[in-house]
Image (cartoon, rainbow, N blue to C red):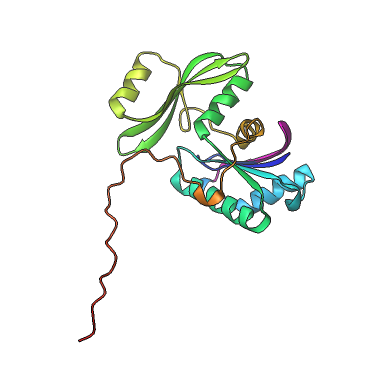
Amino acid sequence: MKILAIEFSSDHRSVAVLDGERLLAAQTVTEGRDTVAVQLIESALGQAEVGRSEIECIAVGIGPGSYTGIRAAIALTQGWQLALGVKVQAVDSLEALARGEQAVGRRGEITLAVDAQRGEFYLAKFELADDGIRNVEPTRLAKRPEYLSLLAAGQPVIGPGLGDKFPAAEHVGRLAAGRSDFVEASELEPVYLRQVDFVKAPPLRKIPPV
């Protein structure tokens, strides 16, 4: 199955083309919001020598991370499925980061962190082993003091903005290659754990004519 993987949850935005778990091409830019997404995708497809119509599945990183970037990736995915009827996989961006760290030889427990703004951080913990990765603690929101206490205790903490560790489309695609839980692109939503703090307006009342 030929997969187009899109990972826009950080300033390091990337696109990859895979045939199963075999990487055919990967493109990464660091311009963040200034990324020309369609051009990046076309460049990766050209490098892989794969046409748009040959893509059978789009794997998209849904965060946590840059809400703007994730929404852009989701919009591209929705348009592609509407036009060409491809399958779609939603992949947790922190799981993709953990998969990347495991692939380069890192082992043991590791905490992944993303700055959620407002003095909060998204935190998740994974166990990296020779035979794969395991989610030990699901992604949650934590206050800054807890995040700082992890650093002070010498806990291994990595993530976007913490050194050069960013989720990559290559690993979004590799994770998707081993799954069959496809979703409708119209149902995709970014990982956003905060309670919604607005109230939906009630429907307009019909006022009879005088």
Does the magenta portion include 129? Answer: no
Quadrant where the N terminus is found in the figure: top right
* Image coords of residue 172 (percent x, y): 60, 35
Quadrant where the C terminus is found in the figure: bottom left
The residue sitting at 40% across, 27% down in the picture is: 123
Does the magenta portion include 19? Answer: yes
Q: Residue furthest left?
A: 210
Any part of residue 43 in sight: yes
Residue 46 located left or right of residue 73: right
**175 shown above or below 36:** above
The residue sitting at 38% across, 30% down in the picture is: 140
Compare residues 71 and 39 and report the one nearer the observer.
71
The quadrant holding residue 106 is top right
The residue sitting at 64% across, 35% down in the picture is: 173
Which segment did they paint magenta?
A: 16-31
The residue sitting at 50% across, 30% down in the picture is: 94
Magenta-colored segment: predominant secondary structure? strand
The quadrant holding residue 87 is top right
Residue 92 located left or right of residue 3: left
Number of numbered tags placed on the structure image: 0
* Image coords of residue 62 (percent x, y): 50, 41
**133 shown above or below 174:** above
**121 shown above or below 7:** above
* Image coords of residue 149 (percent x, y): 32, 19
* Image coords of residue 137 (percent x, y): 42, 22
